[in-house]
Image: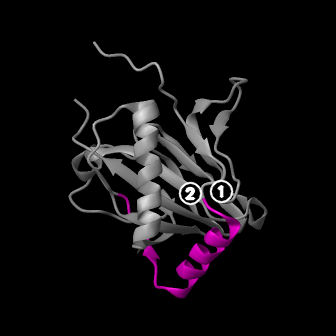
Amino acid sequence: MIENNTFKFVIHNESFLTKSQCEDLINYFEQNQSQDSELAGQYDKNIMNKEVRNTEEMIYTDEKMLSKIKMVLELSNISTYHYNIQEMSSVKLLKYGVGGRYKWHTDCGSRETSTRKLTAIIQLSDENDYQGGDLEFGITDKTGQNNYTATRKQGSIIIFPAFLSHRVTPITEGKRYSMLSWMLGDTFV
């Protein structure tokens, strides 16, 4: 059997995007039409359930940005995960307003989600622009007392295996903007 001695549950790069790039992406979101986010993977078709996921989203297609995200995902896979990946999914911009959340879930499952291998989330908001909205993982921090929580630093990218459970806690004040994509490959065997 082949072992992986470089595996990490979560990788952070705190300077993936500049403040200016983040603000441009937030402005782009606000100036274009978004839609309510749906749930995918276990259903005959995608469904909307705001008790589970309450966000707005839109597809983002700037080739330069997509190439940058794909490059860091591929490098993370080469250095840390060693998964069989073939391509990157579409990139989405997300907005969580007051009450926005995404309860505990994984990004892989059945059907189209079975090909998701790595998740990338980019923090676009300044951490002081909202309350709540923490990205938490189903693993503990170093103390073993709390869930491991991702950095809130604006411009950071967080990469993790799509099978790792995670959530975004409810927003209680302000708005949280982020960017999301997955690296895809044949289902885990």
Residue that appears at 29% across and 62% down: 46
Say which amino acid is labelled 2. Answer: Ile
Residue 31 magenta-drawn? yes
Q: Are marks 2 and 1 in contact (CB under 8 Å)?
A: no
Dot 2: few (<14), some (14–19), or many (≥20) neighbours within 10 Å?
Answer: many
Q: Is residue 58 left or right of residue 189?
A: right
Say which amino acid is labelled 1. Answer: Gly
Whole-percent x, y for residue 5 in the image = 46, 18
User: What secondary structure is found at the residue carrying circle 2?
Assistant: strand
Asked whether residue 37 appears in the rendered view, the answer is no
Quadrant of residue 145 within the rendered picture = top right
Residue that appears at 35% across and 63% down: 90
Q: Viewer-proximal residue, 99 or 160?
A: 160
Whichever of callouts 2 and 1 sits on the residue coming sooner in the sequence is: 2
Looking at this rendering, what residue extends furthest in the right direction? 128
Quadrant in which the C terminus appears? top left
Whole-percent x, y for residue 83 in the image = 33, 34
Vertical placement of residue 152 versus 128, above or below: above
Whole-percent x, y for residue 171 in the image = 67, 61
**In this rendering, the label closer to the viewer, 2 or 1:** 2
Vertical placement of residue 108 versus 67, above or below: above
Q: Viewer-proximal residue, 75 or 154?
A: 75
Vertical placement of residue 143 versus 128, above or below: above
| Circle 1 residue | 133
| Circle 2 residue | 122
Q: Viewer-proximal residue, 47 or 7?
A: 7
Q: Which residues are magenta?
A: 17-39
Residue 165 magenta-drawn? no
Looking at this rendering, what residue extends furthest in the bottom direction? 31
Quadrant in which the N terminus appears? top left
